[in-house]
Structure formats: structure tokens, C-alpha cells
Amino acid sequence: MDDEADTRIFLEDVLLAAGYEVVLARDGAEGMLRYESEPTDLALIDLFMPNREGLETIKELRKRAPDFPIIAISGDSLADCLLQVARKIGANEILQKPFSPDELLASVKKCFRAVARKRHHRH
């Protein structure tokens, strides 16, 4: 979920090239609707978006799905501080813009490994 078209295109290009399916949303409100209609395995959430900003969206996702992997992203001047807040309220990973395709894919893989470990320990 990101309100900037360039960022959405970058995320989509990198993730598709790595073999992931991608569902895009312009903001948190659209992202939550898409999550409900097309469940996904992970969410990338920009902290600054219209119509439900990122921190609020992370809180809502955490309530609905406590183990759902979330990566918070931001490029705002307050990004470092806000990304730490995002981690405290439930983001598994944080990325400060600009980030490289390798950094993005490393965060995605780390989230999926953590989910796999949790599922393994439950059995």
C-alpha cells in the first residue's frame, strides 16, 4: 500500500521479477478492502497515505491477523522515528526509502522465514 505511483511500480516490478504475486492499493482504506477480498501473504505499508495512514492500517491488520507479516516503509523526514513506532505496534520489518531491490527482497524473505518458524513451532 503506497500512495506514490512510482513506489508502487517499483515494488510491483521487483516482487513480480522475484516470482511473487502482487496486489496493489493506493492507500490504507483500499488496502484493507483488498486484504478482505483477496487475502495475501504479506503487506508492504507506507506510513504516509491518505484515507487511513500506515500506522492506523498496521494496527487494524494486527487486530485482525496477529501473525500476518507486515513491512512498514517510509521516506519522510521523520521516517526513522515513525518506522520505530511502526515496529512497536506490529510491523515485522521496516524499510526507509530509498531502498534497493535487494533490501526489499531480503525483508520479504525474512518475514516469510519468521512466519514459517512460527507455524513450525505450533505443530
Image: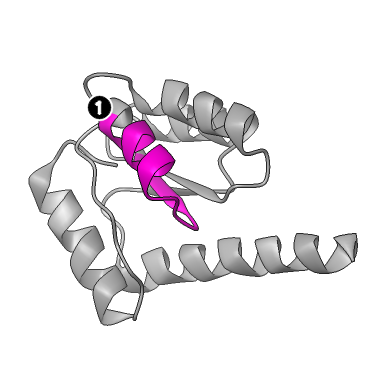
The quadrant of the picture occupied by the C terminus is bottom right
Where, by quadrant of the figure, is residue 45 drawn? top left
Q: Is residue 73 visible?
A: no
Percent across and percent down for residue 37 are: 37, 43
Magenta span of residues: 30-45
Name the foreground residue: 89 vs 52: 52
Q: Nearer the viewer, residue 94 or 69?
A: 69
- Residue carrying label 1: 49
Where residue 58 appears, as percent x and y from the top left, is 49, 31
Callout 1: helix, strand or loop?
A: loop
Q: Residues within 10 Å of mark 1 (few under 14, many from 20)?
A: some
Q: Is residue 102 magenta?
A: no
Picture quadrant of residue 56: top left
Q: Is residue 65 above or below residue 20?
A: above
* Color scheme of the displayed model: one colour
Residue 26 lies in what quarter of the image? top left
Relative depth, front residue between 20 and 93: 20
* Residue 43 is covered by the magenta coloring: yes
Question: Would residue 53 be found to the left or right of residue 121 on screen?
Answer: left
Please give the name of the residue rendered at 24% of the width and 50% of the height, measured from the top-left corner. Answer: 24
Could you tell me which residue is drawn at 21 percent across and 21 percent down? 50
- Residue 110 image point, x, y percent: 58, 66
